[in-house]
Image (cartoon, rainbow, N blue to C red):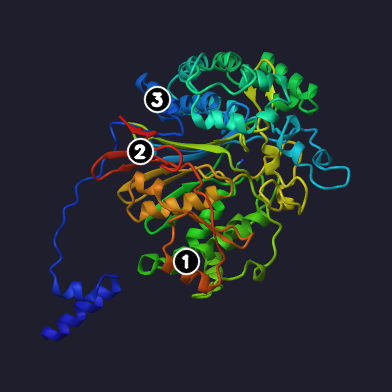
Amino acid sequence: MKLALRWQVLLLGFVLGTSGAFAADTPTPSIQAAPLAQRPGHAGIASANALATEAGFEVLAKGGNAFDAAIAVASTLSVVEPESSGLGGGFMATLYMAADKHSVFIDARETAPAAVNPKDYLNPDGTPNRDTALKGPLSAGIPGEPAGLVWLAKHYGKLPLTASLAPAIRIAGGFKPDERLLGSIREEQKNIERWPASAAKFLPNGNAPAQGEIWHDPDQAHTLELLAKYGDSGFYSGETAKKLVDAVRQAGGDWTLKDLASYRVKERTPITVDYRGYKIITAPPPSSGGVAIAEILNILSGFDLTKLDQAHRVHLVVEAMRRAFRDHNDYLGDPDFVKMPLDMLLSPYYADGLRQTIVPDKATPSSMLAPSNASDPGMHTTHFSIIDADGNMVAITATVNYVLGSTFVADGTGVLLNDEMDDFALVPNKPNVYGLLGSKANAPEPGKRMLSSMSPSIVIGPDRTAVIGSPGGSTIITQVLEGILAFIDGGDAHQVVAHKRFHHQYMPDVVTVEPGAFDATTSDALTHMGYTLKQREPWGFMNVVIWDRRTNKLDAASDPRRQDGLGKVQ
Ligand code: GLY
């Protein structure tokens, strides 16, 4: 009788998925879990610059919410970190509204001007012209960031734009640039010198400002004032629009006033994926990031990574990355222009099929998968994360694409234009600046948004929540993925941003590895499985805020590879 009862308990334990031995031998304690916090009561912000983080807190102190703070952070970054993002670029944002537990995705990505002409990006001999793709006004898409800021204020903020933009306007009146900005100016000095308004802004005395020197950006302050006062029409029509179009056309570009007046922010449904009891809310197309992250997590959900040694864990993650990147290269583009098989790509059954193709203990050469026409975006971008006292959350990744974008400043505006046109597959099957190929789904067309890797994400777990993202071109996707896995494994904000990285993107068929990511045993095992490992300098600039709803503590951290201490809670 006693034995029969024990078997019944064991069987019940098995059916419930618990350990039979535990169920039979240990009385289950009745744990009364403390109720989870409903609102943090304080706020956390992590961005790439201390002045931007402070600007966010300043606006929260004025009664703003996370979305007003996001406007303050993004506009301040336009002034103090122009090498990465700004009014002349675009952003993507994942928002979570605590009041109704609703999330939404804001697409303020740049668009191609109506006169876009693929021939402008070709040399006479038909080879890609890297200069027009990356420098000067032809490389610039119609900016989305100003419209995105207006949209955030109008639909989600509590404060008028005049309040949320006030810190950026004040800081543009005089601030000390950090070494990263000064280094970027020195790096791009030759290109900056090609355009008088760019030189006037970035080389005030013929050279980059000296360290510690106060720098003034009065034209951008004025442009921000017009935006604050008039909203969309303060940028997309009237004085600023005319100056932008005149400057672009005089320098050989093809923008029109109509391009600017027609720019629209798109509100989209984020991609959501469930993984190990966590809900990941992330970027839909025209970012490739969320689709790839979801596909990778769906593949990985069929394995118990926690039971594996590092080499086998990395093997499975790399194989999932390889398969997701192959798809991203082939199918994805602007959803308003391209029909994409998203139902298939996001389906768990599709992931089941891909999982079956992973060989235990052996790398799958990318050449064995169906060939793809690859496409991939650029490296210089910024990300910030915010959670406010009510539990509203925002993850924003913003960009001008390559370092200092096109290096072209439109005279009289202080606006540095992006070089996002290079994120299109400008020349089919020809590598872009990062040596990668492009596909038809991402070919340039009038008014179309270029594919991005930006992956601003919010992860809601049973008792902890994270707001996460990073710059880094195609590595954005794998960084955010690995950050999410580190968070789900229990990492705090510092552990998540500091987590060592590796990256695979289908082509080239190489695993790039940050120094110290793998020990010798793991490297040897992976090499034995057939992987080519290539060490590369650390990459990314991840900024994360985590809310532990059990203790009601916020935790914010910035990437120690770039600058520690930029995450703050107060
Ligand atoms: N320009 C970088 C990206 O959008 O992914």
Q: Disc 2 or 1, which lies upstream in sequence? A: 1
Looking at the image, how many numbered discs can be counted on the residues? Answer: 3
Q: Could you tell me how far apart the alpha carbons at marks 3 and 1 are, in whole angstroms?
A: 42 Å
Location of residue 466 by image quarter: top left
Residue under label 1? 523
Label 2 or label 1, whichever lies nearer to me, is: 1
What label does residue 556 carry, if any? 2
Q: Disc 3 or 1, which lies upstream in sequence? A: 3
Q: Disc 2 or 3, which lies upstream in sequence? A: 3
Above or below: residue 493 compared with residue 168: below
Which secondary structure lies at badge 1? helix
Residue under label 3? 54
Is 70 left, or right, of 434 in this rendering? Answer: left
Above or below: residue 237 compared with residue 92: above
Image quarter where ligand 1 lies: top right
Which amino acid type corresponds to the residue marked 1 in the rendered image? Ser
Q: Quadrant of the C terminus?
A: top left
Front-lying residue, 7 or 110: 110
